[in-house]
Image (tube, rainbow, N blue to C red):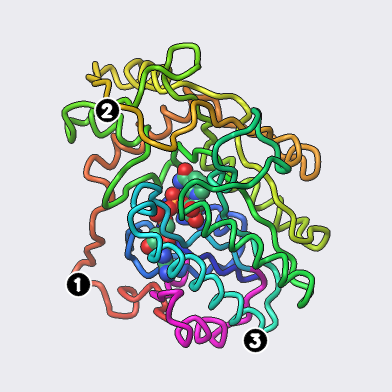
Amino acid sequence: MKTILVTGAAGYVGSICVETLLDAGFQVIALDNLQGGKREAILPAARFAEVDLCNEAAVHSVFQAERVEAVMHFAALADVSTSVVYPHLFFKNNVTGTLNLLEAMLAHGVKKLIFSSTAAVYGEPQYVPIDENHPQRPVNSYGESKLAIERMLSWYVSAYQFRCVSMRYFNAAGASARLGEDRFRESHLIPCLLDVAQGKKPEIAIYGSGYATKDGTCLRDYVHVRDIITAHLLCLEHIEELHADVFNVGHGIGYTVQEVLQEARNITGHPIPARMVAPRPGDPAVLLATPEKLRHRLGWRPQRSDLRTIIQDAWKWRLAHPRGYEPVTVPQSQPAATQLQHTEI
Ligand SMILES: NC(=O)c1ccc[n+]([C@@H]2O[C@H](COP(=O)([O-])OP(=O)(O)OC[C@H]3O[C@@H](n4cnc5c(N)ncnc54)[C@H](O)[C@@H]3O)[C@@H](O)[C@H]2O)c1
């Protein structure tokens, strides 16, 4: 059975990737330092490595413990507004962390990597929909750190014969039946709307109503997290043919903030009060992908990325987990061997 190392495995997208890989019969080492993710999001069948990618020695020890076939690299600091204020944290965590990971892979002969990049590498769109050849001029250090990693990967491909794929996600959303989006500090639109619907926040702020879109609010491309993971599995299947390839992962259909708000009201049955506030600097009017390359090259067909399904799935998970992930409690009577279902590396 092949073993896949998943970094950022306690986070939103990484945890659902772990779930899908386990369901597909892979063994999974789930690596995370828990600075942003929740331990409870890692399913017990995965082996948990509580490791910080910035700790070079600890990263090497993960590869020493077991033969890893490929790495899916989700771990990152990803909050755009924080990245504007503290760029050094993003370069240190994202770029240095990835360099440590690549060095450990090289030392242990592991050469297949699927990297979670972002639409933030494009910056202000010159045209929409955005294809992979669109100029890459990030407007925040988050996007810049991801672009630096993409470039680093291409050198590992040419010099060390790595197989690397960068997946530029647009807006990940939705949930699986067991796992969903639960961050310590939330800034994404759909979970923020659901926070209001669950009474955790009084209202939602809408940043700007004067954009050149059909209702004046920003338009974004939402893609279901399960469709993102399907794209990752397709990449893994075809990775021998892929060399420093880059793919947009978006639905290719956009929704404005007002449309998302209205759909969330319909699905939750909650009025979700909204307040218009000033636009945020650097927020483009429209961010829309063309996912044609992913469709054409890997046969990707999103199954759940219509807005209704995305919000319904996210809401179902919220209703089942009104307080998000709760700490795992192990009954006193259980034998110690069963308690330690995860191997801490
Ligand atoms: N969610 C989105 O809409 C979206 C959009 C574009 C790109 N992405 C990218 O996809 C990836 C996953 O996003 P997410 O929404 O699941 O993020 P998330 O914040 O939920 O998860 C990131 C995880 O990485 C872990 N992590 C961070 N730095 C680490 C380090 N140095 N060592 C070990 N673990 C570390 C955190 O603890 C967290 O569990 C990220 O790389 C992000 O940049 C996400």
- How far, Cα to Cα, is label 2 from label 3? 48 Å
Q: Which residue carries the number 2 mark?
A: 205
Instruction: List x then y, in percent, for residue 26.
Output: 61, 64
Q: Is residue 49 visible?
A: yes
Q: Amino acid at mark 3?
A: Ala
Residue shown at the point (31%, 37%) measured from the top left: 318
Image check: 84 left or right of 166? left
As rendered, which of 169 and 343 lies closer to the eye? 169
- How far, Cα to Cα, is label 3 from label 1? 43 Å
Q: Which comes sooner in the sequence, label 3 or label 1?
A: 3
The crowding category of the residue bearing disc 3, from other C-alpha atoms within 10 Å (few below 14, some 14 to 19, many at least 20), is few
Q: Amino acid at mark 2?
A: Ala
Q: Which residue carries the number 3 mark?
A: 107
Span shown in magenta:
46-70
Q: Nearer the viewer, mark 2 or mark 3?
A: 2
Q: Which residue carries the number 1 mark?
A: 333
